[in-house]
Amino acid sequence: MDVTPGGQTQILERAGTGVRPAALDVSVVIPVHNEKDTLPALHQRLTRVLRGLDVTYEILFVNDGSTDGSGEVLASLCPNDPKTRVIELRKNFGKATALSSGFWHARGQAIVTMDADLQEDPEEIPRFLERLRQGYDLVVGWRFPRQDTFSKRVQSWIYNRLASLVSGTSLHDMNCGFKAYRREVVQTVRLYGELHRYIPILAQQYGFRIDELTIRHHPRQFGKSKYSFHTRWPGVLDLVTVVFITRFDRKPLHLLGGVGLAWFGAGFLICLYLSWLSLFGGQFIRNRPLLLLGVMLMMLGLQLFFFGLLAEMFIHYHHRNDEGYIRTILETPQAPGEGEP
Ligand code: UDP
Ligand code: MG
């Protein structure tokens, strides 16, 4: 099954994004941290769904440093099923790293991610693939109605509203683990730390077309959620990172230089005023706190400005022209013998 609209596979693969060609139609990538009880049922349901589709597929579990025996359960699934692969991380690195390891090794033209806890139904995968086929690059699940604790629902609501506000996306459930990606998306977006929460914002930066799909959600049957309030709130800091890298990563001087110049200007005006008082008013200014503020603003402003310039130099030396901006290149293949002498 071709998930690209109008069968444009070949064109997309040559689209200058550094995209490695896909060997399969679909990869399902599942990050796993201490989920031993759901894994056999998840594997069975996934296999049933994927076999029912007219696709070549693989199921790729990423064991993110589980300590509950999930590794052994996954190892027992593999020998019976050549379509299942398991990536074992050395320790628990977090979901973003688990996903990016899975993305790196996935061979599918479409890549579906879902959590391992069976709070979502693998039977919804065909609906996600259908949306990709309609031309979307990223399809984000919206768990509705959400079957989590009240506090988690409130946190999630605040987080989604905040993220939408600062990024301009209108998604309801950005952090939903159930998503489907066209291959170029996962090879373009860089994931580390806890940035998996903001994949749609990172993808939007490159102009990928994003859609949302309502999915059924179930309460967690086994194990515990890996995220609580104290593990979630640093996500606000990640949002600052995401806003900075999506808005200013190619023009850091616009932010740092702008703020730096404003501070420098304010400090300069203060010092000018004090100099005038001293020179023409005969006032004693050495003991005035305003002098300290003026000098500090000028120095900090200059520093910020030069940080901005350094950041620009860094980008200048690391910028590559093939960083995933291109959707397609339309060109007519030349017949053999034609073209330049
Ligand atoms: N997970 C992971 N590494 C971690 C934490 C979580 O791979 O460090 C996986 C976890 O096994 C699950 C998914 O990420 O498959 C989502 O975790 P969880 O269900 O605990 O999150 P929640 O649904 O409660 O937000
Ligand atoms: Mg869950």
Image: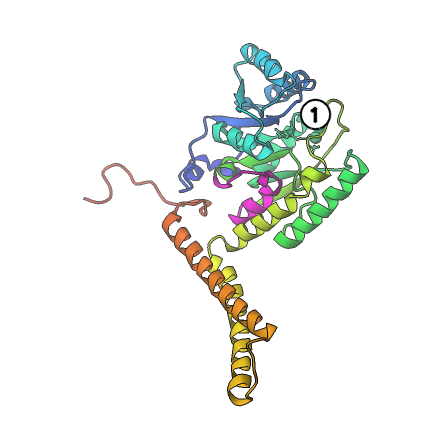
Q: Nearer the viewer, residue 169 or 96?
A: 96
Placement of 338 over or under 104, stated as above or below: below
Q: Nearer the viewer, residue 189 or 23?
A: 189
Place residue 288 in its image quadrant: bottom right
- The stretch in magenta equals 188-208
The chosen color scheme is rainbow
Which quarter of the image is occupied by the C terminus?
top left
Place residue 266 in its image quadrant: bottom right
Which residue appears at 60% of the width and 72% of the height?
289
Residue 250 at x, y = what percent? Answer: 46, 54
Placement of 189 over or under 279, stated as above or below: above
Which residue appears at 51% of the width and 75% of the height?
268
Residue 33 at x, y = what percent? Answer: 63, 25
Q: Is residue 96 left or right of residue 305?
A: right
Which residue appears at 56% of the width and 47% of the height?
204
Q: Quadrant of ligand 2?
A: top right
Q: Is residue 27 left or right of residue 141?
A: left
Any part of residue 2 in sight: no
Residue 327 at x, y = what percent? Answer: 46, 45
- According to the picture, the residue beneath numbered tag 1 turns out to be 118
Place residue 329 in its image quadrant: top left
Say whether residue 194 is magenta: yes
Tag 1 secondary structure: loop
Any part of residue 110 in sight: yes
Placement of 17 over or under 120, stated as above or below: below
